[in-house]
Image (cartoon, rainbow, N blue to C red):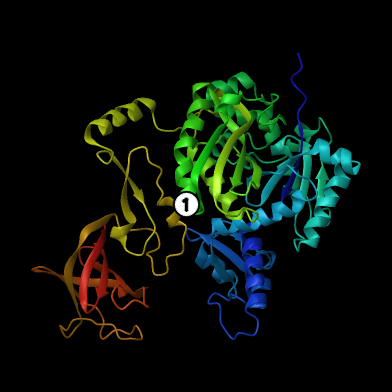
Amino acid sequence: MAGPEPRRCLVVWFPDWPVTAWSRVEASAGHASAGDGTDGGSRSGDPDAVTAPVAVLEAGRVLACSATAQAEGVTEGMRRREAQARCPGLVLVPADHGRDDRIFATVLDRLEQVAPGFQLVRAGLCALPARGIARYYGGELPAAEVLLDVLVEAGIADARVGVADGLFTAEQAARLTEAAERARVVPPGGAAAFLAPLPVTVLADDALAVLLRRLGVRTLGNFAALEPAAVRERFGAHGARLHALAGGRDSRPHVPRTPPPELTREVGFEPPLELVDQIAFSVRADADAFVAALAAARLVCTELRVGCTDADGRVSERVWLHPAAFDAAAVVDRVRWQLAAAEGLRGGVVGVRLEPVAVDDAAHHEPGLFGAGVDDRMHHALSRVQAMLGHEGVVTPVIAGGRWLAERQQLVPWGERAVTAASRAEPWPGSLPAPAPATVFPRRHPVVVLDAADAPVAVDERDGLSGVPVLLVEGARRRPIEAWAGPWPIAERGWDAVRGRRAHRFQVVDADQTAWLLVLEQGSWWAEGRYD
């Protein structure tokens, strides 16, 4: 018996979207500040900065880079220093996912003036059922050309469109489209043949890709040729889902069910709320209940419609698409993003509506061999202990953002989302690059670093040393220094006379081959950590 006919999907992909988003912000800033004589720091307001080679960095690696940077040899995933070595004039920009989402929301608004109902997969990638727009514009390729022309009018020339059976195949078609071609249509039923020569790495599962290559399975066609039962037995439901993708079957091959009405939740606010953070906080409990109700029915939400109503009755409504399934945190994030991008809402928000547009069987989204989550028994046991000891009685260590090692170590109550994870992506000038010391002292140890004349080593205003470090004094122990590096300045809140801090970091190796991370602050030396 044949399965349901796959749904035709149109995908619009924006290559290197973080660079495009930053460039649009820079261009706007340059226009707004023209003639005021100010310097935007990282070349803000400089029209040349928009056309210069640009790389967006996250965690010290290139997240995305412009075409001019790629021409100089800069590639995604490259370390910062290597990228700068290949392209000395490279403009480095810290990643800002909020900026990416905000700018992409304005692009979606422009697209929806032509074809309403776009679904946001992530910033830089959106999807639309192809049937309606193709019928209106006389075909899938003419519809794609209309959307591309709209984007060109909006100042975005480097966008690609793919049309195919299912979201995954359509995205790959868009990614393989050349700049001159701009759009690629995979004929109905041709997904498997189109995907067959692609490498298994496009499945975005590194662990599975490595294992498959070791087994001699290098392309999606090779993977799709394996027996489905054997794949499910070896890799679980997750592997079976990727196997279906490799064979050209949509990630949700069944016809999406219409969810029962009781799964929709509405949140009312009296009086109306105006701050996005207030609304997001107020929606959190209902988001938890929303996901819990789906879980009770053994369902997960894959498409979510969020509706926000203001005091004047205006409604901001959008359908959001998740590459896997929504959890409560993802629901709250979508509400936050939608409110941040909404321009027509005034007078405060009186209500938020959460409606699952499409759901899927939860069994299709269970973690398999790779990417398994926390064991249920462990979760239940720790939850019981937490109930006895209190909310903060059981905590999980997480790494936060920051310049000082001690402040980067934080404890989050069990079950809570690590909200500090977002701050790790923020720029922290002066922070210590990886690898961090294996031992970080909860309280810095006082030490002394001496030069050859037995005088304490100091650093002047130009970061020059008063002498070469030759001896590390730790309590009563004197450790000869065999190698050292630094100083690396740390400046924090320089505008604040009370909370401002300025220090210099050093790395030293003593005669016992023990490496230390030292800090010189206000004339005093401290040991911040040790490389064991």
Q: On the rendered structure, is 442 left or right of 435?
A: left
Which of the 4 image quadrants contains residue 21?
bottom right
From the top left corner, tell me how far across and down residue 419 is, in percent.
41, 49
Closer to the camera, 459 or 397? 397
Q: Would you call the spot at circle 1 few (<14 residues within 10 Å), some (14-19), or many (20 or more)? A: few
Image: 366 above or below 218: above
Image: 192 above or below 418: above
From the top left corner, tell me how far across and down residue 26 is, in percent.
63, 70
Which of the 4 image quadrants contains residue 131?
top right
The residue furthest top is: 1
Q: Amino acid at mark 1?
A: Asp
Residue on which disc 1 sits: 277
Give the residue at x 17% y 84%: 455
From the top left corner, tell me how far across and down residue 272 is, in percent.
51, 48
Give the residue at x 40% y 32%: 374
Whether residue 14 is visible, yes or no, is no
Give the residue at x 37% y 61%: 402
From the top left corner, tell me how far across and down residue 55 is, in percent.
59, 65
The residue furthest right is: 138
